[in-house]
Amino acid sequence: MKIGIVTTTYHPYPGGVPEHVYHTCVELGRLGHDVRVVTTHFGSGRAPNEEQVIRIGRSVPIPANGSICPVAVDVRMRGKVRRVLLAERFDVLHLHEPLMPALCLAVLAEAEVPVVGTFHANNEGALGYRLFRPLLESYIDKLDARIAVSAAAVRTVSRHFGGEYTIIPNGVDIDRFSTATPAPPRGDGSFNILFVGRLEPRKGAKFLLRAMPRILREVPRARLVVVGSGPMSGYYRSHLPDGVGDRVVFAGRVSGEALSRYYAEADVFCSPATGGESFGIVLIEAMAAGAAVVASDIAGYRDVVKDGVTGLLVRRGDPDSIAEGVIRLARDGELRQRLTESAGREVRQYSWDRVTGRILDVYESVLDGGAADSRESVLETEWSEEGVELDVI
C-alpha cells in the first residue's frame, strides 16, 4: 500500500505530532508499506527520514490555544499539492489535524483517494472551528474516516461537526524509554523531579517552580530538572523563587537518547499543564521510564493517568497541590513503587506496533469502503442544545 501522511508540523519542528507521524512511518515501513510524509519547510534541519519527506511551502507561526501553532502557507499551495498527488498516486491519504490551513485543506480539496483524518487538539474555545464552521463543513465531509487521539480531542471537534470517531491514542517508543540509562549517573543522593515541555504559559512550569520552596522544606535533597525551551525560558531562569536556584537545573531542549536518559534519572515526573492537552505523550514516556507521575487534573491527562493507580492528579495551577503530590511520593517509597509498577503494565498499550496496527485497520476499512469496526474505540457523537454526548458503541 502506498500511503501519504500529511501534517503541518514535522521534524525538525519538535512536538508530539511530528513524533507520532515519524514513528507511524517507521512502523508502516517495517510492515512493508511505501510511505511519504507531505509537510512544509521549517527553516534549517532535516527529519530522520528526510528521504521520505515532500515539503511544500513554509511554516508561519500563529498564536493559538495558549501556544504557537505553525501553519503551512504558499500562494501556489493547491497547484503544488495537485502535482504531488498526481505524481505519487497514493492509495490512501492520512491527514493530521485535517482542518488546518492551508496544506491540509488543499489536500482535501484535491484528493481522489480515500482520506483518513486524525484530530489531536483539545481546545475548549476552538475559535477557528466556531468562526469558520460553514466553510470547514464542506472539507470535513470529505473524510472517509475520523480518528481522535483521546476523548478530549473528540469533544473539541465533535461539538462543532458531530460525526463518528475512532479513538487511537498517541504511541511511544516503549523500549527506548524503559531501557535507557540515567543521565547524569545516579549517586549524588538527590531526589530528582523532572519537567519536560515547551516553556510557555500553557505547560505550567511556573507553578512547579513556585512549588519548589515548599518541596525543598520537606525534601531538602529534591532537585528539579527542566528539559525544554520556549518563549518563557529567559523569564523562568531569571525569576526563580528565593532559595531554590542551586536546586533547579535548566537543561534546555534535548531529544532522542538524551531525553530518554533524563526520564531514566527521574524519581518523579511532574507535568503541571493548565489545559489544552489532548493526550499527554510526556506522561506515557515517563511511565515507560519508570518515573512516578504527578500531573494536573485536566482533560487529556485524565485519559492517561488513573489517579492513585498509575499516578497522582493534582489541582491545576495550584503550587501547593503540586508540592503535596511530589512530597507524598518522596516520603512514600511503597506508593511510588506501586504506581510505577501499575503504570508499567498500563503503558504497553501505547507501543507503536499496537497503535500503528489500529491505524492500519482504519486504512484497510476505508479502502474496502466500510467504517472502522472497533466497538471499544468508536465514539458516536450527536449535537444537541445541551452539548455533545459521547457513547461507546
Image (cartoon, helix red, strand yellow):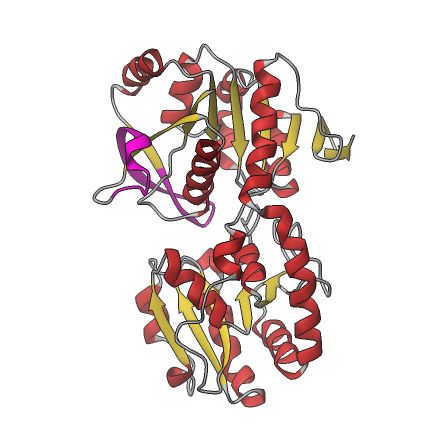
Q: Taking the image as drawn, is residue 201 in sight?
A: yes
Horizontally, residue 10 falls left or right of residue 338, namely: left
Residue at x 52%, y 57% (from the top left corner) = 285
Residue 182 sits above or below residue 161 on the image = below
The magenta-colored residue range is 46-70
Q: Farthest residue in the left direction?
A: 44
Residue at x 35%, y 35% (from the top left corner) = 71
The answer to which quarter of the image holds residue 319 is bottom right
Instruction: Give yes or no for residue 59 being in the magenta stretch.
Output: yes
The answer to which quarter of the image holds residue 318 is bottom right
Residue 90 sits above or below residue 44 on the image = above
Instruction: Give yes or no for residue 340 being in the magenta stretch.
Output: no
Residue at x 48%, y 37% (from the top left corner) = 27
Residue 329 sits above or below residue 82 on the image = below
Q: Main secondary structure of the magenta part?
A: strand
Residue 169 in the image: state x and y as whole percent.
Answer: 59, 42
Residue 390 in the image: state x and y as whole percent.
Answer: 74, 35
Residue at x 67%, y 65% (from the top left corner) = 341
Residue 215 sits above or below residue 174 on the image = below
Residue 105 in the image: state x and y as whole percent.
Answer: 42, 22
**Total numbered badges shown on the rendered structure:** 0
The answer to which quarter of the image holds residue 296 is bottom right
Horizontally, residue 349 falls left or right of residue 32, namely: right
Q: Taking the image as drawn, is residue 314 in sight?
A: no
Name the foreground residue: 49 vs 250. Answer: 49
Looking at the rendered image, the quarter that the C terminus falls into is: top right
